[in-house]
Each structure stands twice: as structure tokens, then as C-alpha cells.
Amino acid sequence: MENVGALAIILAFCFSVYAILASVVGKWKANPFLLLSAERAVYCNFLLLTAASGILVYALIAGDFRLAYVAQHSNRSMPTAYKFASWWGGQAGSLLLWAWLLSLYSAIITFQNRRKFRDMMPWTVAILMFVQGFFNLLIAFIASPFDILVQGRGIIDVGDGQGLNPLLQYWTMVIHPPILYLGYVGFTVPFAFAMASLISKQKGEEWIHTTRRWSVVTWFFQSTGILLGAGWAYAVLGWGGYWGWDPVENASLLPWLTSTAFLHSVIMQEKKGMMKIWNMVLVASTFFLCIFGTTLTRTGLVSSVHAFAQSPIGVYFFTFLGLGIAGTIYLILDRLEYLKTETKLESVVSRESTFLFNNLILVASCFSILWGTLFPVISEAVTGEKISVDAPFFNKVNVPIGLSLLFLTGVGPLIAWRRSSVESLKRAFFWPTVGALVLTLVLIFAGIRHFYALMSFALCLFVTWTILGEFYKGSVAIRAKTGQNLLAAAVELTHRNTRRYGGYLVHIGIVIMFIGFTGKAFDKDTTVEVGVGEKFRLGGYEMQVRELVDGDNENYSWRHAKVDVFQNGKLVRTMEPERRGYKASRQPTSEVDIWRRLNEDVYVNFAGSGVGSNKAVIQAYIFPLVSWIWVGFWVLLIGTVVCLIPSKVKLQYARTQVVGVASKQYVEVPK
Amino acid sequence: MKPYLKFGILVVAIVGTLGWLAAGGISETKTYYKEIKEVNAMGKDALDRRIRVGGDVQKDSIVRSGKEVRFILTQNELRLPVVYVGNDPLPDTFRDGSQALADGRLGSDGVFQANRIQAKCASKYEGKPGYKVPPPVQNAPVQNKAAL
């Protein structure tokens, strides 16, 4: 079986190389047969990688412990879902997942556009297959998931494996990597279209129209993946945080920031014909940051808690990045004349300018995070001393950035295109500003003195007010016309321009998440070593360890603490944190218990107990408002889905449509 | 040209502020990576810098008393006593023999005051293949390509 799997990967590599050659030569010689064969090679590549993935998953589930990968990442006692998740539990397997997802995307894109964009498609296919070829190369020859364990001349069957890392045995971890990958890998598609449009010297924005929806979908997956990771860290790692500015977390955030910037600046290109070069730069940066993120997690460039073992594949990644970036820069510089802007900026107080600042700030944030993440590498190269920066650095820069973005979220949508008069500004922002100031005063009287927290709450109210105001104004206008009730009118309004109002919903989701982030300023925690029956206090709660229970199953053994939580002398909740010792990996883990509520979470971690001792080390935390992050995230998801629903009313953009060459005929088949 | 000038001023102001914040953030939190050998060689300099020092946790050296955890980091025969006084729970991977990174400052008594510990279990993500191999024969098991 493993031979078939390995062979499938090698064949997939051959097909991806063939697809590049056939596309390029077919385009050059205008040979439709070659172009068609290139497209079919894309489908074959997908089928072969599907077969290879299927074989690996089968080996993991069936427990074929002759395979090194299976022996290292699966074992007999794990539940089947985790056996399946072992597919992406290690390096070779997760690279296979990357390759497989890309092959799936490439097949979908090729099929959807098989009769469109005859000028651009061969190049798109070639670029997709170039990236594909790189990953196929890695899993075929450098980090194969189908290596077997041998000793001398004999194959070894170790009988049972080491199992998936216990920390990863949690439900969000089953879906977090593939979803994040769906986002990472997905950005290859807009990149391929953008580059193809440059290579084939398209004048218009065909690539943006085609990939806009696609970008939104990949953005959706990136956001979900990041949030699942945060949720996992919060619920599993036991330190109560959802974000630690770890290099790997940063790596997933970087492309998200640039793709968010891209989603905004694309509007500028569509409506005003501005920022064309910038969009090329953003789409390329996002793609390369995705690859860079994979590099960072795979090669141990920067020391991180999550990083996979050091491995030789770094060289390949850096070569690929170097070649790709150089090629992209060359292409953009060479085709500058096709990227001329069509309009000029007229005023600082205009919609255009808010978009520009939004982009500036997002990119600045991205740059600061990249800088901080790579600081050890940079400082070592410059001064010879390896210096790292910590969470306070990232917070110091990114909290003000976040707040300015929040401010722009409220301001941007209400400012007119081209220029805004003072009168209209007053009309739009007077009441929201008054509301925000009143809220600030109320909070100060309530005893909140934290500067950023005050600012954040005030801005959250300001933004919510302006956005709801937009919904309200639009709905009232529709109600006046149709006589529907306000709610139905709001739905109708959203349906008429899903992109705009879906976008507003996403903004509301972000605001709700910011409320959750702000809660961080009011965290409380305590660590105590207590025996059964002893009490301790945290905030308004009194806690008491009732009992410690030991137990055992085939995957792990456990010790369970029952902690009663009292409020005003009344028992309100019993928390049950647990410590586990996983047998296969001989690794202990903590299972925290979280009492989730909208106002605050109570979070109890059983950090350990001395050998033979009846005392338990308990860490208890209170996290105000943290649940708002997850709620806001659901709103963001719904908003994104709304954006993807086609609008009922097709809006004509004010500016003259630049017609691309997309409508050109399919190349005639030579007789 | 006026809007562009205004715009330029705003951009410079924003980038300048962020640069200033970043510079402040770096100087506040920068931590020097050092080996135990280097920490010992630094002498007085070591006292006023945040340092991140790595090594293996010496077997049976972990002593817990309440919130305080004491242990000894070793690297090639060199030893560094560490006391952990931070608030966050120690990672689950922190135990005898694991690789650990301690962040903090060297106390004047020669004990390293750590406020953050990161631990990396050797088998965290990529384990050593064939740990449960039948009694060793001549060659240690090695990974090999699937024979085609």
C-alpha cells in the first residue's frame, strides 16, 4: 500500500510539472490540445493526491505501524477521529494535506473557468501547478509520509505507535489545522489569477472580479482557523490566554492582516480604479506570507513552543520564497503601465482616504508583528546577539493600531466618496460621538480608570451606533416604499446589497470581539496549594476543593478535582478540572474546567499535586467578557456568509467599466 | 497637491507614532538569549538584563513549594539553579529531563529568577521513530524511503 501511495505522489509531481510545461507551451504555440491536456493533468494530480491521502488515512486508522509516520502519530487506543486527525498531526502529513487541498482548489478553479479567460487561464494553471509542484516535490522526495521503519534489511512493525500529541487531542484541534490550511492554501488562487493577469497583460480587473468571492471565502477560513486556534489555546493550554504572540500564532495572523487590507482596497480598485499596484502587492504579500507561515511552523527558524522539529526542508522553502518574490517583483515592475491609477485623491476627509488609512494601519500592524517575530533572527544578524521581544511589545504597538482600526470602522462607511463637507460630518457623527463621550463618563464614574479600556468601550459604542444607524436609515426608506415592518425591511435592505451590509455585519462582529478583548484589562487570578476541604477566595467567589478522584482508561490515567464555587455563601457551581497522564506518549496534560458566561468566565486549572500528597495546586482565574470574542466571531461568520450571497439588485458602478480581454473567443482548433 | 501633502503629513505622523511605540516596546521587553556558560561569564552585566536561558531540567531537581518551583538547568556539565516565581502554570511538558527555556533575571545570589518557563518535550511533535523496538539488534532502526 505504502508503495502505491508513494508512487501516487511521485506521479502527481510529474503531472504538476507536465501541466506547467503544457500550459506554457500550449499558450505559446496556441495549441488547444496541449492546453486541454494541461487541464486534465490538473485533474489527474488531484486524483493521485486524493489516493495518496486516502492510503495514509487508511494506514493511520487501520494502524499500519510499519510506517514511520503512523508509528509516530497514531496508536491503537486513540478514538478514530483523532486517528484521522493524525493526518495533519506531523510534518509529512500536514504537507500532504497542503498539497491535497491545493490540488482540490486547482481542480475546482480549472473546471469552473474551463471555457473562460482563454488568455489568462493557461498562466493561472501554470502558476497553481508551480506551487503544487513545489509541495509535491517536498512530499515525494524530502518529507515523505510513506517512509517505513527498517532495521538493517528488515522492516519493523513496532506494534503500537506513540499517538497524537495529547495537547492536540481536543475537538477544535481536529478541525483547526485543515480550516486554517483551507485559508492559507486558498490564497494561492487569487495570487495565481493576479500574476496570470500581469503575465498576459490584462488591462482590466477581470482577476479581481473572478477572485473577489474566492478571497472572501479564504478570508472566512483564515478567520475561522485563527479563532479556533485561539479557542483551543484558551480551553486546553491551561494558562487562560487565547493569544500569546507566539511566532506560530503570528504566522497565521500576518496573511490575515494583509488579506483583510486586500478585501478593503479591492473596493477602491473596483469603484475608482485606484490602488492597482498596491492590490498586486497585497495579494502577493498575502500569498508569500502564507508560505512564510508554513515555513516558520515547519523549520524552527524562530524558537516557538509549537514549532515542529527542526528539519532540512527550510532550505527548499526559502528557495521557493526567494524565487517567487523575485519573480513577482519583476512582473509588477515590468507591467507598471498596465497598473496606472485612473483617479486622483481629492481630499483627506473622504472615503478614499479612510480606505488608504485602513490599509496603512493594517500593513503597519502586519509589519510590526513580522518585525517582532523575526527580531531574534534580525538582531543576531546585525549585532551578533540573539534578542527576542515579548508579548508587551506586540501589545504596545497593536493595541493602538486595533483601536484606530476600530475608529475607522465607524467612520469609513459614513464618509462620502471624493470629499465630505463639515456639515455632513456633523450630521453623521454628532450623536454617536455624544453617546461615546457619555459612556466614557459613566464608566469613569463606575470606577474604570484603564485608559485603553475606556477608549475601546467608547469606540465600540460609537461604531455600533454608526453601523446600526446605517441599517436604520436604509430600512426606514424601504419601509416607506413597501410598508414592511422594520425587521423585514432590514432583511430586504441587506439582500439588495449583500456585500455592503454583510460587510457591516462583519464590522459589528469585530466590535463585539473588541468588547471581549477589552475584558482582558480586568482579569483576576490566584494560585493556591490547598488540601481537601480548604477554602480560598478569588474576586467575589469563594472556592473549596471537595474531593480528588483517581481513575484510568486505556488512553490515559487521570486525577480529577471537584471544586465547589460559592458566591455570597451559596453554592453556585462545581468545577471539575482534571490532570491526565497519557500512556503512549507518557505526557501529562491539564484539562481545565471553564464556567462560561457572558459577563465573566470562571476558569479553574488543576495544576498538579505532590507525589502521595493530598494537596492540590489550583489555579483559578476570572476572565470578564471573554465569551464576547466567540459571540462576535459568530456574527463575523454570519456577516461573511451574507457577503457571499448574491445581491438582489445588481449595482452599476459609477465609473466606466474597463472591459478586459476576457470575452475573447476560445482558440480555434486547427483543421 | 494640497490633499497629498496633508495625507503625507498624516501618514508620517501615524508611522512615526507607531515607530516610537515599537522602539519603546522593544527596549522594554527585549530578552537576551544566553547559554548557561555565557550567563556565568557575564558577571555583573547579567544582573540588569532580561535573559532567556535554555538547558535540560536536571533529573529529580524539581522542588515545588506552594507557588514557588525550584529546579536546576544543566547543559554540558554546567548547572544553573532556577527559581520560578511567575503566575502562569508551568507547562505540562515541563518535567525531569525536558528541555526548558527560562525567562527572567539573574539574582545577586546566583539563583536565576524566572518569571516564565517554556518547556519543549523532545517528543512534542516529532517523536523519535521506533522507540518501542524489539531488543536492539546490530543497527539502530533508521527511516528509509518506501522501496519502489
Image (tube, coloured by chain):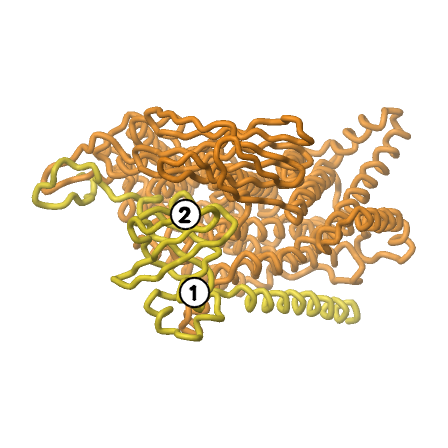
Chain colours: A orange, B yellow
Using residue A505 as the reference point, say whether residue A257 is left or right of it.
Answer: left
The amino acid beneath tag 1 is Val
* Residue B64 circle label: 2
Q: Secondary structure at mark 1?
A: helix
Please state the horizontal and vertical placement of residue A536, each as a whole percent of the image. Answer: 58, 38
Q: Nearer the viewer, mark 1 or mark 2?
A: 2
Camera-side residue: A671 or A452?
A452
* Residue A377 circle label: 1
What residue sits 59% from the left and 51% below the top?
Answer: A257
- Specify few, some or many for label 1: CA neighbours under 10 Å numbering under 14, 14-19, or 20 or more: some
What residue sits 61% from the left and 51% below the top?
Answer: A262
Image quarter of residue A479: top right
Same subunit, labels 1 and 2: the answer reads no
Camera-side residue: A41 or A438?
A438
Q: Secondary structure at mark 2?
A: strand
Height in image: A658 above or below A596? below
Camera-side residue: B69 or A3?
B69
